[in-house]
Image: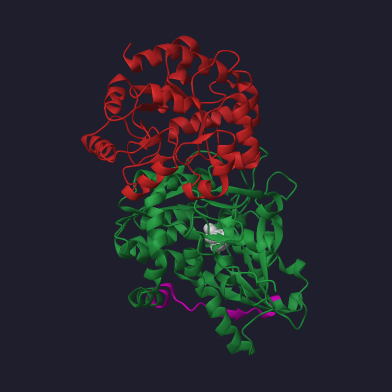
Amino acid sequence: MNRITALFLEKKTQNLNIYFTAGFPKINDTKLVLKSLQEGGADLVEIGMPYSDPVADGETIQQANQVALDNGMTVKLLFEQLAGIREEGITVPILLMGYVNPVLQFGVEAFCQKCQEVGVDGLILPDMPASVYEEEYKAIFDKYGILNIFLITPQTSESRIRHIDEISHGFIYMVSSASTTGAKSGISDVQEEYFERVNAMNLTNPRLIGFGISDNETFKKASSHSAGAIIGSAFIKMLSTSTDLDGDTKAFVKMVKGQ
Amino acid sequence: MIAPEIYNVNEKGYYGQFGGAFIPEMLYPNVEELRVSYLSIMAEPSFKEEFEALLKDYVGRPTPLFLAKRLSEKYNTTIYLKREDLCHTGAHKVNNTIGQILMAKRLGKHKIVAETGAGQHGVATATVCALMGLECIVYMGEIDIQRQAPNVARMKMLGAKVVPATSGSKTLKDATNEAMRHWINNPVDTHYIIGSVVGPHPYPDMVARFQSVISEEIKWQLKEKTGKTNPDYVIACVGGGSNAAGAFYHFLHDEETKLIAAEAAGHGISSGLSAATTFLGKPGVLHGSRSILMQTEDGQVVEPHSISAGLDYPGIGPMHAHLFESKRATFFDVTDDEAIESAMELSLLEGIIPALESSHALAVLPKLGAKPDEVVVINLSGRGDKDLETYQKYIK
Ligand SMILES: Cc1ncc(COP(=O)(O)O)c(C=O)c1O
């Protein structure tokens, strides 16, 4: 069974998904950070494929993308770095997050095949429209057992949320506010109302809440309305000043989880 | 029977394999709202009336179609210039911003965000925002802010806030990224006025329709002057491609008129410093649509180069990608030096100082091989006031 699907069958709440950019801060840090996140207790890991024009991302993740690209990071190299991780004891569900163009240039089928080969479980491609996925790529994703994770926002209509729920497997990425990543921090009452409005819809897929989550307080608050939360910018900020990636990463996960 | 090639957008938002709406979910409600309503709003009699009245009394349309006698003599053919440089604010860009500001008002938006390269679109946006009393934010690459200083001052005088884009190549591509991010962060009250036929569907089609007044006028003006509506050639420069889309629009299915697109080759297409997308690009997705894109093997967008800020963009609109692929349009690469030379030539022969962008269209003339009995229309998309600092370095 897909590791993401398996996780949510077993663990319905307090799931922590942490995002980091591949090849950041140094080109060969990808596996180290991944391993430390697992050992620290992250429930899912989202590895960012750096892109030159990340329009959905705020300054922190943009800069991490640029550093990684300057380091020489590529999609091809990422698959090389991830080769063998499942044999080496990495069991945490892994998502790749990125923009659609590098995936198209790699070739969607070749990309999904590589994901299956190295043990990637799902993809988040924010600029790939649901309609294009359904018409052109779903069959390929299914063939290689790769889940595609869709986003919803406070502005997403009820009928569209229902449609996204129908075509989703794994979980739905519930963006807490209409913004780019790292733009806002904290969770307001208005946002909590939105989480509850979605909860009341009785969707088949669990939700993870992302954007604005940075610490134990926001993680707990988000988790009280969903199956867990996603942290990106706050973790990247920590990484960019860390002198002990392994220790600091584990401490970060424990801080967020309140352990 | 083979169906005739269709060059307009189809109902799904595609031109052949190009187009679509590759946008994050955060932008979906805004783009969808526009998609379902743009055609019906544009068809409303009150919209048409207001749009046409402003084009006439505010922009100064119709712009003249001018027989350039000395230029024609030099190239031994008949050359007409479509004088978009005489539009209020100095370029064709205002045709689109007038249309989009009226659209924004009907959609109930109070704030406007835009990107700009040369600053012409930024000025045209700031202008219509002042006219309508809407708040205006313009993103502009840091490098472009330096090389197009007069336009920055104009935008500020018109009440717009100009925000430098400091990421990537610090030019038009990055200003567009920032404008999109701004829209993501302000989805409810803000309309994004894109300045070219790029972006997610329906932008390329909407902008092309607003600019199509250019070719509509060329047809009747040419008929008045020559007795025929269709020239042998229409030439326009392509950054994103809005002036070209407007100049080509009503000729798309008149195959006797050859469509010629001039792309900025910078220092030359094999120099590594170029913005000639069809020569150097491959199909890919940027700024919300699938088109042709300058990119690395890994799918990273390549930073382009052109002396002309308005053409310094690594993509082209999806309509042009389709015109290229279907061979309906012919693309020429024009270097910085060739553009400068053509700007000097037009100034001396006709007393018209063209924008650097438009100079790229003029620079096709020596390579075109037009015959003495043929008629060439060049879309003179803008005037050169904003480029004087650059031109000054070349005046002998
Ligand atoms: C005078 C002029 N022509 C052409 C362009 C290029 O844009 P497009 O290709 O959309 O016409 C610009 C852009 O700034 C411009 O100012």
Residue A100 in the image: above or below residue A44: below
Question: Residue drawn at (46%, 18%), measured in percent from left and top?
Answer: A241
Please tell me in which quadrant of the rendered image residue B37 appears. Answer: bottom left
Residue B196 image position (x, y, % from top left): 51, 59
Q: Which of the image's four quarters has the N terminus of chain B?
A: bottom right
Is residue B174 shown left or right of residue B49? right
Question: Residue drawn at (52%, 56%), measured in percent from left and top?
Answer: B198
The foreground one among A219 and B228 is A219
Residue A135 image position (x, y, % from top left): 54, 50
Q: Is residue B114 magenta?
A: no
Is residue A227 shown left or right of residue B377? left
Say whether residue B67 is visible. Answer: yes
The foreground one among A105 and A130 is A130
Q: Which of the image's four quarters has the C terminus of chain B?
A: bottom right
Check the image and tell me how it is coloured. by chain
Q: Is residue B70 magenta?
A: yes
Residue B126 image position (x, y, % from top left): 39, 58
Q: How many marks?
A: 0
Q: Quadrant of ligand 1?
A: bottom right
The extreme left residue here reads: A189
Question: Residue drawn at (34%, 27%), measured in percent from left and top?
Answer: A227
Please tell me in which quadrant of the rendered image residue B238 appears. Answer: bottom right
Residue B209 image position (x, y, % from top left): 49, 69
Q: Colour of chain A?
A: red
Q: Which chain can be seen in green?
A: B
Say whether residue B301 is visible. Answer: no
Residue A93 in the image: above or below residue B362: above
Residue B340 in the image: above or below residue A42: below
* Highlighted magenta segment, given as a residue range: B54-71
